[in-house]
Image: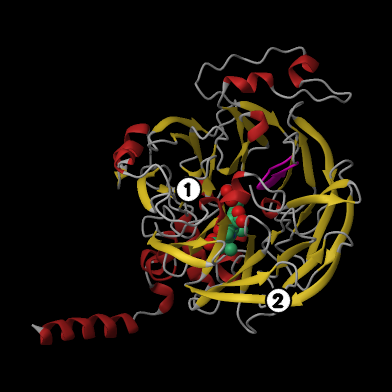
């Protein structure tokens, strides 16, 4: 039997080596080079789905260039050393060929994926440990798809548990901090009980998911999908789907959803569409009818145009804001009156006033700003927004009263993440997308100068920061398979401790997240 297996393997491998590379069938090329990240069925995994519907903004020529040279600021590597031009072209044709049937994920399909791990009524209503439940961090370990729950006072792990493959985006918490909601790139949403350190339930609400948001009243989870092109509203209690919102304009053109966030004072979710120049507001509470009224010279857009918006009878109606361009990445001012958005393919950032529902200013943002990682603070009495840049070694600091760039702070290279805390004078920025990714830089929020460069592990990648609830410690990820969380004293900037982890990515302090601390991501 063993002999037979060996012979079969030998014949297969030796016959494969005699096939000229150019004549390999495209399906085999796809299986060999693309399927690991994009899945055999092309519906996406850690990489996006490779379907014509998902590639609407990418010409075939650009797709060839991406396969040959990779895509900056993503995990897509270049294949020019492994594939001939003819092979790359055949792969491009292959991925631009529609699937015989488009995946549908209706309410019933989503419901059918639900997995209940633990019933809430069997669990303790109070934390089962003595640590401060609001000063815990959930640390995402991408190396082996786990989460470590870290005590933010003792700086010791409380537990570690496996997650779905490739979590992405910030972890979101219920308003009281008891439940954590996680999203994976392939659409799984998981609800974890932080008091009992147990998984409650999971459901697959997308095929290629961008991120999730939790309503400020804790009642709903909104899922933003690339595929299918939908937003899905889940009941936050049991994750059962309540409504699927197709991401289409009023002509029926569809779009991927770039991302969704909760806007607490507006009692609404805000979502941006990747393929349509629209930003959507989706109120989830009758309180949203009393939206804050802008006090300046403009009026609510409905009054200004004299039009009565069509009555949308769905439970989660959509208010469409037609804006001046595509919005891939965005951020809010502290009162959620404005959204600052930018497209990944460059150009200027735009400021959308959420009350009047239109663009009111442009922001001069070079390269590829990473607005989702922006933070705010008060600089000389003025609220400012600072954003790292995925393509240039610069942190742009923007005056949020007149939307002018106050300063471009030069850093050692393009970075992904930035963090601070209300109690610290410093903001930390990484160099994740640069050859200098072993370094992080510390910026003085009062002078807007880089005051320190740290290289905690020469030659290794460090990224993503978070502070404990009191702002005493700054935690940094040593983003390696045998990596660690490196803890710094936030005042002295000296290293305090290393906690071994498997390629830690993001870490999220419960208190900072539920209080929407100006130094953290929302
Ligand atoms: Fe992210 C957040 C988009 C690649 C790690 N990333 C986000 C968010 C968006 C986004 C819209 C905000 C969602 C939220 O928090 O709810 N990310 C994108 C991209 O478009 C991009 C460039 C390409 C892609 O593949 O989607 C991208 N991101 C990455 C990575 O390669 C990173 C470094 C590693 C990984 O695991 O995928 C990565 N993204 C993160 C992290 C956050 C994130 C850790 C949460 C940051 C936070 O502090 O909240």
* Mark 1: secondary structure: strand
* 441 up-or-down from 517: above or below: below
Residue 148: numbered disc: none
Horizontal side, residue 48 vs residue 511: left or right? left
Q: Seen in the image, is 388 located left or right of residue 155?
A: right
Image-quarter location of ligand 1? bottom right
Quarter assignment of residue 16? bottom left
Question: Which residue is rendered at x = 17% and y = 85% of the image?
Answer: 6
Name the residue beneath numbered marker 2. 494
The kind of secondary structure element at disc 2 is loop
**Which quadrant of the structure image shows residue 18?**
bottom left
Compared to residue 147, the image places residue 494 above or below, namely below
Q: Which residues are magenta?
A: 325-333
Which residue is at 65% across, 51% downward?
Answer: 521
Residue 470 showing in the rendered view: yes
- The front one of 333 and 59 is 333
Please give left or right for residue 490 compared with residue 200 in the image. Answer: right
The single residue placed furthest to the front in the displayed view is 130
Residue 60, given in percent of the width and then of the height, sits at: 58, 56
Q: Which residue is mark 1?
A: 180
């Amino acid at each position: 039997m063993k002999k037979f297996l060996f012979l079969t393997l030998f014949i297969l491998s030796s016959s494969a080596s005699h096939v000229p590379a150019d004549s390999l069938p495209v399906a085999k090329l796809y299986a060999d080079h693309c399927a690991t990240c994009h899945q055999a069925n092309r519906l996406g995994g850690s990489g996006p789905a490779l379907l014509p519907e998902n590639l609407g903004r990418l010409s075939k020529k650009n797709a060839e260039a991406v396969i040959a040279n990779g895509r900056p600021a993503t995990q897509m590597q270049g294949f020019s050393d492994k594939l001939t031009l003819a092979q790359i072209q055949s792969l491009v044709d292959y991925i631009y060929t529609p699937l015989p049937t488009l995946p549908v994920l209706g309410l019933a399909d989503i419901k059918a994926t639900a997995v209940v791990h633990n019933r809430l009524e069997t669990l303790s209503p109070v934390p089962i440990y003595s640590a401060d439940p609001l000063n815990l961090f959930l640390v995402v370990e991408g190396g082996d798809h786990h989460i470590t729950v870290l005590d933010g006072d003792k700086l010791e792990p409380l537990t570690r548990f496996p997650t779905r493959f490739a979590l992405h985006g910030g972890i979101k918490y219920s308003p009281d901090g008891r439940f954590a909601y996680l999203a994976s790139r392939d659409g799984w949403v998981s609800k974890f009980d932080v008091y009992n350190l147990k998984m409650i339930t999971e459901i697959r609400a997308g095929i290629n998911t961008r991120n999730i948001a939790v309503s400020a009243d804790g009642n709903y989870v909104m899922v933003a999908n690339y595929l299918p092109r939908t937003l899905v509203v889940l009941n936050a209690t049991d994750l059962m789907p309540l409504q699927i919102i197709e991401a289409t304009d009023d002509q029926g053109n569809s779009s991927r959803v770039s991302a969704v966030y909760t806007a607490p004072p507006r009692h609404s979710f805000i979502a941006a569409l990747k393929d349509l120049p629209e930003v959507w507001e989706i109120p989830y509470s009758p309180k949203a009818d009393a939206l804050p009224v802008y006090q300046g010279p403009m009026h609510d857009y409905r009054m200004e145009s004299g039009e009565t918006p069509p009555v949308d009878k769905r439970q989660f109606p959509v208010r469409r804001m037609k804006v001046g361009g595509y919005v891939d990445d965005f951020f809010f001012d502290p009162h959620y009156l404005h959204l600052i958005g930018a497209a990944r393919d460059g150009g200027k950032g735009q400021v959308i006033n959420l009350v009047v529902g239109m663009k009111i200013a442009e922001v001069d943002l070079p390269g590829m700003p990473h607005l989702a990682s922006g933070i705010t603070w008060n600089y000389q009495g003025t609220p400012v927004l600072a954003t790292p840049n995925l393509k240039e070694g610069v942190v742009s600091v923007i005056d949020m009263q007149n939307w002018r760039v106050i300063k471009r702070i030069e850093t050692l290279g393009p970075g992904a993440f930035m963090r601070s805390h209300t109690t610290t004078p410093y903001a930390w920025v990484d160099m994740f997308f640069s050859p200098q990714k072993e370094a992080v830089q510390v910026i003085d929020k009062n002078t807007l100068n880089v005051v320190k460069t740290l290289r905690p592990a020469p030659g290794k990648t460090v990224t993503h920061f978070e502070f404990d609830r009191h702002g005493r410690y700054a935690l940094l990820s040593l983003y390696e398979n045998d990596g660690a969380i490196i803890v710094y004293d936030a005042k002295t900037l000296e290293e305090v401790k290393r906690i071994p982890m498997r390629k830690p990515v993001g870490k999220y302090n419960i208190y900072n997240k539920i209080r929407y601390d100006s130094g953290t991501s929302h």
